[in-house]
Amino acid sequence: MKKQYAFLVDTERCIGCFTCAMACRNYYHQVEGVVWRQVHPLSEEIYPHRERAFLSLSCNHCENPACLNVCPVEAYTKREEDGVVVHHQEKCIGCGNCIRSCPYGAPKYNPVEKRAEKCSLCHERLDAGLKPACVQACPTDALQLVDLAELERTNEVQYPAGYPRMEGLNPSTRFILPKTPKMVRR
């Protein structure tokens, strides 16, 4: 299997500080209302415990990305060397096909540029031997960059309830879910 970079979200470590989202926003100087990385608290319906749990989400850099497959001007490419799905905004015509097609909501419409944009896993930082801005900024190491081939050898990684698996796309983001607290008898 070729190298496929993936985000590993460890919900046991995430404290919901939004540092990852702010690092992304600051690095790319995103316009107001355009957010590539979001931190979502897990609701009690999904995680019914007193402790808080969060999911830090952005583009999944899918194996078979819907955004790439529907773009009429080839504004998306998938890098052979690491599986990163790169959006080339200068080619984008703002048709919105990618926005409508991505079941994860990764591409966002930029009303100033009148084009789509999304996380490209800081590919320019990767090329310079650096971690993505969001991963580097995480104070608890709850967000990590991993090679999916190596990660798949472990059994600790799962998908959270309600997360669309979308087998045809094969999203690369993986999760370490919070452990269920043991009941204390008194």
Image (cartoon, grey):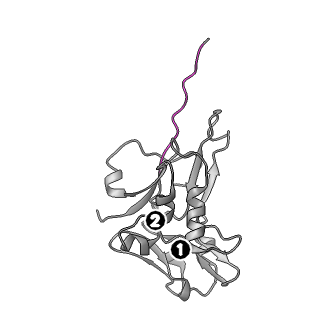
Report the quarter where the C terminus lies: top right
Dot in front, 2 or 1: 2
Which is more toward the observer, 173 or 127?
Answer: 127
Secondary structure at badge 1 equals helix
Residue plotted at (53% across, 74% down):
67
* 1, above or below 67, in the image: above
Q: Which three-letter amino acid code belongs to the residue tagged 2?
A: Pro
Residue plotted at (47% across, 76% down):
86
Q: Which three-letter amino acid code belongs to the residue tagged 1?
A: Cys
Q: Is residue 28 left or right of residue 147?
A: right
Q: Is residue 15 visible?
A: yes
Mark number displayed over residue 67: 1
* 46, above or below 20, in the image: above
Query: Is residue 41 a member of the stretch shown in magenta?
Result: no
Query: Is residue 182 a member of the stretch shown in magenta?
Result: yes
Q: In this view, does 44 lie to the left or right of 64?
A: right
Q: Where is residue 161 in the image (x, y as percent from the top left)?
A: 57, 45
The answer to whether the residues at label 2 and label 1 have Cβ atoms under 8 Å apart is no
Mark number displayed over residue 9: none
Q: Where is residue 109 in the image (x, y as percent from the top left)?
A: 66, 76
Which residue is farthest top?
186
| Magenta residues, dominant SS class | loop
Q: In this view, does 43 lie to the left or right of 132?
A: right
Q: How far apart are marks 2 and 1 (CA)?
A: 21 Å
The residues colored magenta run 175-185
Which picture quadrant has residue 78?
bottom left
* 8, above or below 72, in the image: above
Q: Can residue 167 be seen in this view?
A: no
Secondary structure at badge 2 equals loop
Which picture quadrant has residue 79?
bottom left
Mark number displayed over residue 132: 2
